[in-house]
């Protein structure tokens, strides 16, 4: 059994002008595909691990054989992170969250604006390559964190429900060094319905 690129539910140009067509195409068909190829390659001699859910491997990384642990961390993390990333974006989206996630954000950060400012700060503060995350932590509370490289919150006992890729490959063609502009634009394509679904799947 091999991992394959999950279907993208919108066209490469669907998130324009916030995420440009060429970045979407390269990010999805080249970068994400490379994580999948490298993950499959790492697992090729480990049929028992191929049968496991990827989330379980990432959650219990210390149980993955040392010979492939770094590869599973980087490329398994990359596959899981990008799969989530595509799903929490859609065209004509953004705006205000509704439902349970809106209530929990208000409970934790008082206002959506305050939450977004804190999330933006985390995303801007990633040194080099990494992600900003909205997670459910080990106590069941929402938290904003940032992690380097392709580390998944699962590796730290947390459940990701929303993540923003701030690797340069995610924005450099359109935004060059202006990561804050990319971060600001990204809120226009956030699919709050999916974030809500992710939150409910974990907490209910
Ligand atoms: Mn990426």
Image: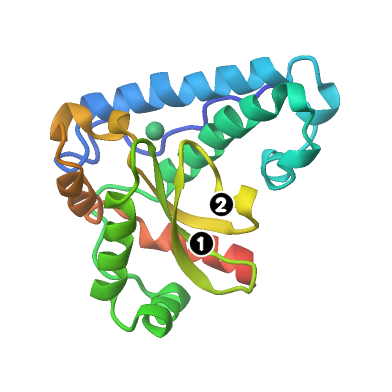
Q: Which mark identifies residue 33?
A: none
Q: Is residue 12 left or right of residue 150?
A: left
Foreground residue among 33 and 16 = 33
| Residue located at (45% from left, 42% from top) | 148
Indicate whether 58 appears above or below 69: below
Q: Which mark identifies residue 153?
A: 2
- The percent position of residue 13, horizontal first and vertical second, equals 22, 32
Indicate whether 75 appears above or below 188: above
Indicate whether 62 appears above or below 96: above
Q: Is residue 86 left or right of residue 41?
A: left
Residue 63: which quarter of the image? top right
Q: Residue furthest front?
A: 127
Foreground residue among 167 and 55 = 167
Label 1–label 2 contact, CB within 8 A:
yes
Q: Which residue is mark 1?
A: 135
Q: Residues within 10 Å of mark 2 (few under 14, many from 20)?
A: many
Q: Is residue 153 visible?
A: yes
**Quadrant where the image shows the C terminus:** bottom right
Indicate whether 148 appears above or below 172: below
Secondary structure state at the residue bearing disc 2? helix
- The percent position of residue 95, horizontal first and vertical second, equals 24, 65
Please tell me in which quarter of the rendered image ligand 1 is found. Answer: top left
- The percent position of residue 62, horizontal first and vertical second, equals 76, 40
């Amino acid at each position: 059994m091999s991992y394959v690129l999950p279907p993208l539910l919108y066209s490469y140009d669907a998130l324009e002008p916030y995420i440009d067509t060429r970045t979407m195409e390269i990010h999805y068909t080249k970068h994400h595909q490379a994580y999948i190829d490298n993950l499959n390659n790492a697992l090729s001699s480990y049929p028992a691990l191929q049968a496991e859910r990827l989330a379980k491997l990432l959650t219990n990384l210390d149980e993955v054989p040392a010979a492939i642990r770094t590869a599973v961390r980087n490329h398994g993390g990359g596959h899981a992170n990008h799969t989530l990333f595509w799903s929490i974006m859609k065209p004509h989206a953004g705006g205000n969250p509704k439902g349970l996630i809106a209530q929990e954000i208000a409970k934790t950060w008082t206002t959506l604006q305050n939450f977004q400012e804190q999330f933006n700060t985390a995303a801007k503060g990633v040194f080099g390559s990494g992600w900003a995350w909205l997670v459910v932590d080990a106590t069941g509370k929402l938290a904003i964190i940032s992690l380097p490289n392709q580390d998944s919150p699962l590796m730290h006992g947390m459940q990701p429900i929303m993540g923003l890729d701030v690797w340069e490959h995610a924005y450099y063609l359109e935004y060059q060094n202006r990561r804050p502009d990319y971060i600001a634009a990204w809120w226009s394509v956030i699919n709050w319905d999916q974030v809500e679904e992710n939150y409910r799947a974990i907490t209910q």
